[in-house]
Amino acid sequence: MIGIADISANDLIRKALEEFGRGFAIATSFQDEGMVLVDMALRISLETRVLTVDTGRLPAATLDMIGIVEQHYGMRVEVARPEAGEVAAMTSRFGMDLFREDTAFRRLCCEVRKVRPLAAIADVRAWAFGLRRGQSESRRDIAQVEEYEGRLKLHPLAAWSKNEVADYVREHAVPRHPLYAAGYATIGCDPCTRAVHAGEDERAGRWWWEQDADKECGIHFSPDGHAERRLDVLLSEVLAAR
C-alpha cells in the first residue's frame, strides 16, 4: 500500500497507477488543481480514469469542460450523478434551495448530490484530489496520503502553492475552466459559487452566506459532533422518503 509522504506529485500519481491500475482515479471539478492532476496522470497513462460528479446544479461552463477535456486529451471522462429518487425526496421535503437555510441543510444537499454519488463508485480503491494546504484553514494539515473509509485519498499537490499550480498550467497548456476569467477563484455548484472580491481569500466565493463554517462539501472532511449528527438525521429522512 502506498505509504510514502512528501514525494513529488508526479511520482505519487505514478505509484498509484502502478499499484492500483484501473482502481485508481482522478476526481475533479475541472478547477486548476484538479486539471494539473489530470494532465500529470494522462501524460503517464491515457488509461487513467478521470471522474467528475454532475450534481444537477453545475454551471454550464463546468459541463462544457467535460467535452473540452475529452477533446484535448483524447479520452473519456466518467460522470457520476446523484440518485434521482434521493434528490427528489430531498427537494420535495426541504425545497430546491434548501442549502440557504443553514449549514446542516447545505451539507445535506452536498451529501446527496456530491458525496454519495462519488462513494457509490465501488471499484475505485484510491482517489487523487487537488487539495492544497494553502487553500484554507481546514486544509492546513492534509497529508499526501490518507486512508478514509477503506479507500486511499491522495493529495499530490498538498504542499504546492497557488503560484506553482499557475506555473504548471501555463507551462503545459492545461485547459482552464472559463469561470476563472470571470473572477472565480473556486468553482462548485452554480447557486453556491460566486466570483471573489478584492482582498477575499480564494474560498470566499463558496457558500458566502455562511458564517463561521468550514467551506467544505463533505467529500474531503466530515462535519464534527452535533453537525454530523444533524446531517445523519436529515439524511435518514431523505432516504426514508425515496
Image: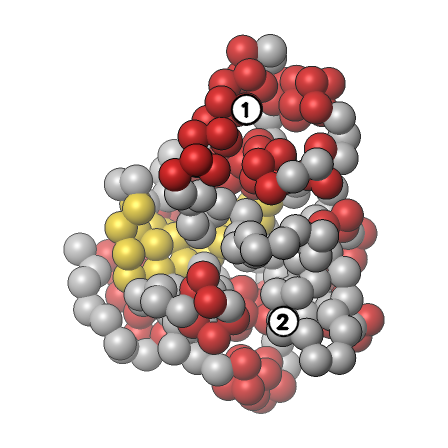
Q: How is the image coloured?
A: secondary structure
Residue 155, x across and y down, in percent: 38, 64
Q: Considering the image in quadrants, where does the N terminus appear?
A: bottom left
Q: How many discs mark residues in the rendered view?
A: 2
Q: Quick check: can you spot residue 143?
A: yes
Element type where label 1 sits in the image: helix
Q: Which mark is residue 90?
A: none
What residue is shown with label 1? Answer: 234
Judged from this view, the residue extending furthest toward the top is 241
Q: Quadrant for residue 98, please give it.
A: top right
Q: Amino acid at mark 2?
A: Glu
Q: Nearer the viewer, residue 46 or 199?
A: 199
Q: Nearer the viewer, residue 134 or 87?
A: 134
Q: Amino acid at mark 1?
A: Leu
Residue 78, x across and y down, in percent: 56, 45
Horizontally, residue 155 falls left or right of residue 209, namely left
**Is residue 218 placed above or below 39 in the rendered structure?**
above
How many C-alpha atoms fall within 10 Å of the one at disc 1: few (<14), some, or many (≥20)? some
What residue is shown with label 2? Answer: 202
Q: Nearer the viewer, residue 83 or 202?
A: 202
Which comes before the other along the chain, label 1 or label 2?
A: 2
